[in-house]
């Protein structure tokens, strides 16, 4: 669940002295979840989209094993791969780097 929340919050730009409608302070996702990794954000994207590793692999033209390794941090997400993910799911590729 934290990975899904981090995935959603990763797209929000931090803003100095932001607050919600109740006046409560808001904090950037990276401050709240400092251990977030590109792999966690990829897992969060999958959760948001409701797809399996196998389905994501098919969209990206890679093996399911590669998706698993990227999520675990055993394989880095290249800029090219991040761009393919971003284009396929209409998100900024930079969150996966």
Image (spheres, rainbow, N blue to C red):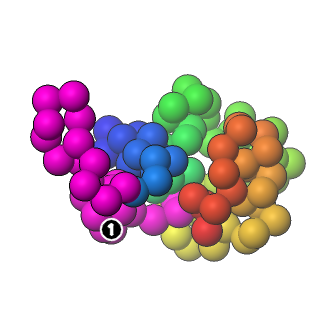
Horizontal and vertical percent position of residue 42: 56, 51
User: Could you tell me if residue 22 is visible in this image?
Assistant: yes
Q: Nearer the viewer, residue 53 or 18?
A: 18
Residue 29 percent across, percent down from the top left: 34, 55
What x and y, as percent, mark residue 65? 67, 56
Highlighted magenta segment, given as a residue range:
15-39
Please say if 95 is above or below 24. below
Is residue 22 shown above or below 38? above
Say left or right for 6 vs 52: left
Residue at (73%, 70%) from the top-left corner? 78
- Which residue is nearer to you in this view: 28 or 3? 28
Q: Is mark 1 on a helix, strand or loop?
A: loop
Residue 52 at x, y percent in the picture: 60, 34
> Can residue 71 be seen at all in this image of the molecule?
no
Which residue is drawn at the image coordinates 31% and 59% (left, top)?
16
Q: In this view, does 24 lie above or below 93?
A: above
For mark 1, what is the residue? 35
Q: Residue at x 80, y 52 (%)?
A: 84
**Camera-side residue of 32 and 52:** 32
Residue at figure coordinates x 73%, y 49% from the top left: 85
Asked which quadrant contains residue 23, the reply is: top left
The main secondary structure of the magenta stretch is loop
Bin the neighbour count of mark 1 within 10 Å (Cα to Cα): few under 14, some 14-19, many 20 and up: few
- Magenta-colored stretch includes residue 31: yes
Front residue of 40/22: it is 22
């Amino acid at each position: 669940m934290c990975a899904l929340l981090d995935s959603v919050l990763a797209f929000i730009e931090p803003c100095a002295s932001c607050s919600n409608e109740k006046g409560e302070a808001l904090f950037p996702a990276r401050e709240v979840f400092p251990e977030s990794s590109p792999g966690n954000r990829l897992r969060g994207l999958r959760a948001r989209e409701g797809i399996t590793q196998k389905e994501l692999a098919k969209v990206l033209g890679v093996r399911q094993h590669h998706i698993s390794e990227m999520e675990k941090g055993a394989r880095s997400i290249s800029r090219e791969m991040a761009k393919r993910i971003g284009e396929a799911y209409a998100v900024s590729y930079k969150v996966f780097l």
